[in-house]
Amino acid sequence: MASPDRDRAVALSLQLAQAHHELRHQLTRLKQDLGTGRVPNELLATHCLAFCAALTAHHQGEDAGLFRQLLVDRPDLAGTVTKLVEDHALIASILSRTAELAEAARGASGTALEAVGRELDGLMAIMESHFGYEERALRNALDEGVADTGWSALVFGFGRPR
């Protein structure tokens, strides 16, 4: 029979995968709504900005909490953590550009929305690669147990208090 601590650790790796799934789903819905006319551009810009904020909060929670704790508990993962933090910086620059384009697209159509769509396409590709790598690279460490010093609320709640 598994111990509660072991069950909690395995739950963390599953929660990480679920958080990534939810972020993928949000981005897919945003991309599908873009330019369809189903959602007014004002609202699309707001949705886009909210998604950018959620992904940013998730990555900041990982950088400041999960990754910091991983380096304490598993210093052998320093190279992996460095790569993931670098990915976060790249994604942050794409999110910043996406947010700028979304703001500019408020009330616009055509090329302004197309620019947002192109940025979202690039973001989707990078997120898919990043999330897959992160899940594979951290699954064993999370399943073996990483102290949760409060980081899980930011990582899994996208910045919302739990």
Image (cartoon, helix red, strand yellow):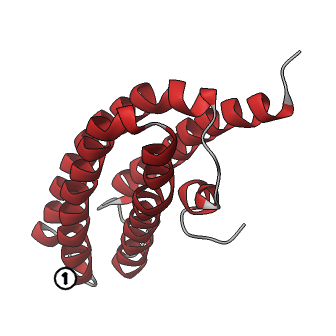
The residue lying at 44 percent from left, 54 percent from top is 68
Q: Nearer the viewer, residue 12 or 109?
A: 12
The residue furthest left is: 111
The residue lying at 25 percent from left, 63 percent from top is 92
Q: Position of residue 15 (x, y in %)?
A: 63, 41
Q: Is residue 31 visible?
A: yes
Q: Secondary structure at mark 1?
A: helix
The answer to which image quadrant residue 91 occupies is bottom left
Q: Nearer the viewer, residue 100 or 151?
A: 151
Work out whether 90 lies above or below 82.
Answer: below
What amino acid is found at the position of numbered circle 1 in the picture?
Ala
The answer to which image quadrant residue 16 occupies is top right
The answer to which image quadrant residue 145 occupies is top right
Q: Nearer the viewer, residue 46 or 142?
A: 142
The residue furthest top is: 1
Residue linked to disc 1: 104
Q: Is residue 130 visible?
A: no
Q: Nearer the viewer, residue 84 or 48?
A: 84
The residue lying at 24 percent from left, 39 percent from top is 125
Q: Is residue 61 left or right of residue 36?
A: right
Q: Position of residue 111 (x, y in %)?
A: 10, 67
Work out whether 85 lies above or below 140.
Answer: below
The residue lying at 48 percent from left, 47 percent from top is 72
Q: Position of residue 110 (x, y in %)?
A: 15, 68
